[in-house]
Amino acid sequence: MQTLDYPAARAVALVVQTGSFEGAAAILGVTPSAISQRVRQIEERLGAVLIERGVPCAATEKGAWLCRHMEHVGMLERALMEQLPGLAGAASPAERVTLSVAVNADSLGTWFLAAAAAFSQASDYLLAVAIDDEDHTADWLRRGRVLAAVTSLEKPVQGCHVRALGTLRYRATASPDYMARHFPDGVTAAAVARAPGLTFNQKDRLQHAWIRQVLGRSIVYPTHWLPSTQGFVDASLAGMGWALNPVHLVEAHLAAGRLVELVPGAALERPLYWQVNRLAADQLAALTRAVVGEARRGLA
């Protein structure tokens, strides 16, 4: 059985984290060519490509698993240093460990950031937050690219613990002027098929889910593509299109009349869950507490 070359594995993790061989070299205080040599040697030894060379560099599937292993190692070493501080030399402070998590953009734009900030203020860990649709963040766990994720998947991903967080509630909103122009006779199937909406990206199905919920069938509608949670609100206010917006971000605009609901009271609810890798659950307990606590305050 081969032993893992941990200096080389750390070089791989840092290339992925910084996106370049130069970034990893700067952190380790060596030359980029030395990093390249370490990466090449461990790839040859393992018989697998670990890094997709590009701008930025990214981990392959096998490289992602190695990066998560190095996060586990970093957490275990940090816990050991806390119990045996003599292991850490005074001249070499403990290295900061970066933890990778995945979250949907609307959670990040409403409640999750407060949880991440609370965790970071009480911990020495750094966070690398990946953004994806809540129906797809669980894939990041399956592929070993993150240690924890906010997801719409209730069933535990293999090797993970799951905690219910609550429900993120959405309202279909638009400006009064937009409603007058596109829905003068109300929200009908024919009007929806003509009125431009807003879509985050190709994975975003929220508007389609709301249409099916309200009208009982799927309707293809023209759309602007706008990958920004706050951009959705701003574009709705500007009359660019209609969209599903988190209640947290539009309730003041609704109260002031700057936005109106397409169909009053027709909210769309998305249950959310926190899934965390079992091997990292103990080390991430503080993050889990922060996430669950903030979700209870910020979600329905």
Image (tube, rainbow, N blue to C red):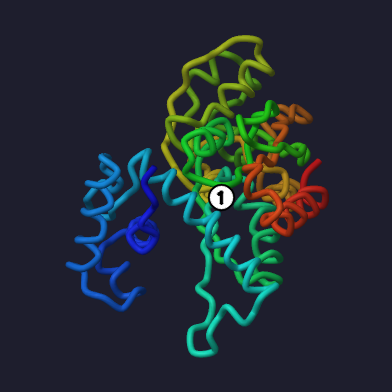
Where is residue 121? Give x, y as percent.
68, 72
Image coords of residue 112 (percent x, y): 66, 53
Q: Residue at x 60, y 43 (%)?
A: 149
Residue sitting at the far front: 1
Q: Quadrant of residue 76?
A: bottom right
Residue occupying the far top of the picture = 217
Rendering coords of residue 245 (x, y %): 63, 41
- Residue 206 in the image: above or below residue 192: below
Of all residues, the one furthest to the bottom in this rendering is 91
The local secondary structure at tag 1 comes to: strand
Left or right relative to 59: residue 207: right
Comparing 78 with 224, the one in front is 78
Say few, some or many: other residues with alpha carbon within 10 Å of mark 1 (under 14 / 14 to 19 / 20 or more).
many
**Is residue 198 visible to the viewer in this orientation of the structure?**
no
Residue 225: % across, % down: 41, 37
167 relative to 4, above or below:
above
Q: Quadrant of the N terminus?
A: top left
Where is mark 1, residue-wise? 101
Q: How many marks?
A: 1
Q: Answer left or right for 53 relative to 119.
A: left
Does residue 183 sit above or below 220 in this rendering? Answer: below
Can residue 32 be seen in the rendering of this structure?
A: yes
Horizontally, is 151 left or right of 266 in the view?
Answer: left
Which amino acid, mark 1? Val
Image point (58%, 36%), residue name: 134
Name the quadrant of the C terminus.
top right
Residue 220 or 294: which is nearer the viewer? 294
Q: Residue at x 51, y 31 (%)?
A: 204
Q: Residue at x 70, y 72 (%)?
A: 83
Q: Name the foreground residue: 6 vs 173.
A: 6
